[in-house]
């Protein structure tokens, strides 16, 4: 069971125990989970490849090589009609589009969590003036799919997929980055942001975007830090949207602007 489906299940349990008024809405979530379990079971029994490989094959069959827009449409279609994918989706994707479109065309972007390359393709198509994306993916199998997806979309020259744990790779990077997109393990968001700060990978004006910080996901520590930390390091806002491919279920993104750190700020990694 992938992380988003697991979050759906946990969200149902927690809410049913605390808020009976939410039962009708959570029944819809139960239906969504059962539908995805059924899809996965049918695919497995039918001898189909893993969902990520199946998504790549679907893109190759239904998208135009070198056309990033058609790749995104095919991935969205696969996730709606075939099997759920932990992609950003078009709803929240439009929010990210607006932020990336406001960057210089030569901007540098750091993505934590490539998955199958959806967000990397989405951002790269808007950075055609020499912009570069470094995307870190812990799962080697997903990283291979992401590389193939970027290659098929025609953006492979703009996207570097690095395979490994973010905690090991972030200290090796050189900044600054104009935008950082967090879309990996939710319990790594805060400590990885601290690592990014400590390494000097962002500068005043850099944008930090955190996906999946809505009511189904526990991002309280991260949100508290970027919104209310005592050193006023960020100007932060929550952008409402919906869960990828399930418009009836709310989700959101936190968009934070780095304001810089004062000399008296302690190392957050040292107190973690």
Image (cartoon, rainbow, N blue to C red):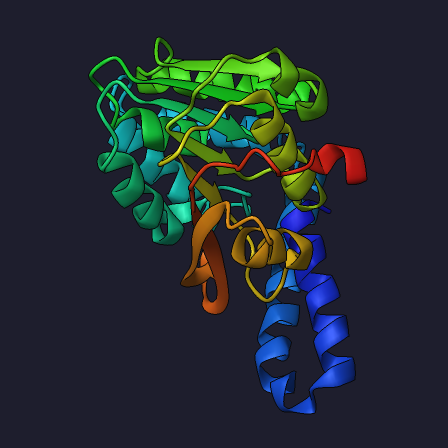
Q: Outermost residue toward the front?
A: 264
The answer to which image quadrant residue 153 occupies is top left
Q: What residue is drawn where x is 42% and y is 41%?
A: 259
Q: Is residue 81 visible?
A: no
Image position, residue 149 (x, y; %): 43, 21
Residue 89, above or below 118: below
Q: What residue is drawn where x is 52% and y is 15%?
A: 161
Q: Nearer the viewer, residue 12 or 162?
A: 162
The answer to which image quadrant residue 203 occupies is top left
Residue 173, above or below 51: above
Image position, residue 166 (x, y; %): 66, 24
Image position, residue 52 (x, y; %): 57, 31
Q: Nearer the viewer, residue 44 or 201?
A: 201
Q: Outermost residue toward the bottom?
A: 21
Q: Outermost residue toward the top?
A: 157
Image position, residue 125 (x, y; %): 27, 26
Please count the marks in the image.
0
- Residue 32 is left or right of residue 13, and the answer is left
Q: What residue is drawn where x is 61% and y is 52%?
A: 225
Q: Is residue 60 visible?
A: yes
Residue 28, above or below 225: below
- Residue 159 is left or right of residue 229, and the answer is left
Image quarter in which the C terminus is found: top right
Q: Nearer the viewer, residue 177 or 161?
A: 177
């Amino acid at each position: 069971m992938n992380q988003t489906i697991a979050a759906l299940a946990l969200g149902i349990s927690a809410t049913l125990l605390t808020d009976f008024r939410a039962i009708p809405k959570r029944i819809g979530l139960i239906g969504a989970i059962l539908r995805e379990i059924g899809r996965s079971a049918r695919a497995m029994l039918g001898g189909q490849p893993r969902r990520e490989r199946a998504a790549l094959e679907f893109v190759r069959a239904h998208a135009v090589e070198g056309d990033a827009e058609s790749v995104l449409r095919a991935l969205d279609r696969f996730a709606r009609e075939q099997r759920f994918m932990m992609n950003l989706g078009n709803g929240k994707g439009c929010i990210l589009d607006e932020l990336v479109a406001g960057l210089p065309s030569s901007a540098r972007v750091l993505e934590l969590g490539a998955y199958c390359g959806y967000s990397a393709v989405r951002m790269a198509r808007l950075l055609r003036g020499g912009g570069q994306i470094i995307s870190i993916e812990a799962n080697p199998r997903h990283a291979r799919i992401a590389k193939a997806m970027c290659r098929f979309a025609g953006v492979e020259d703009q996207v570097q997929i690095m395979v490994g744990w973010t905690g090991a790779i972030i200290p090796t990077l050189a900044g600054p980055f104009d935008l950082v997109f967090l879309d990996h393990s939710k319990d790594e968001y805060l400590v990885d942001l601290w690592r990014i700060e400590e390494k000097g990978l962002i500068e005043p004006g850099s944008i930090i975007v955190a996906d999946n910080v809505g009511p189904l996901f526990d991002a309280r520590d991260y949100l508290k830090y970027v919104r209310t930390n005592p050193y006023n390091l960020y100007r932060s806002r929550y952008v409402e949207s919906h869960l990828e491919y399930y418009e009836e279920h709310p989700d959101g993104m936190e968009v934070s602007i780095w304001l810089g750190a004062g000399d008296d700020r302690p190392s957050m990694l040292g107190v973690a």
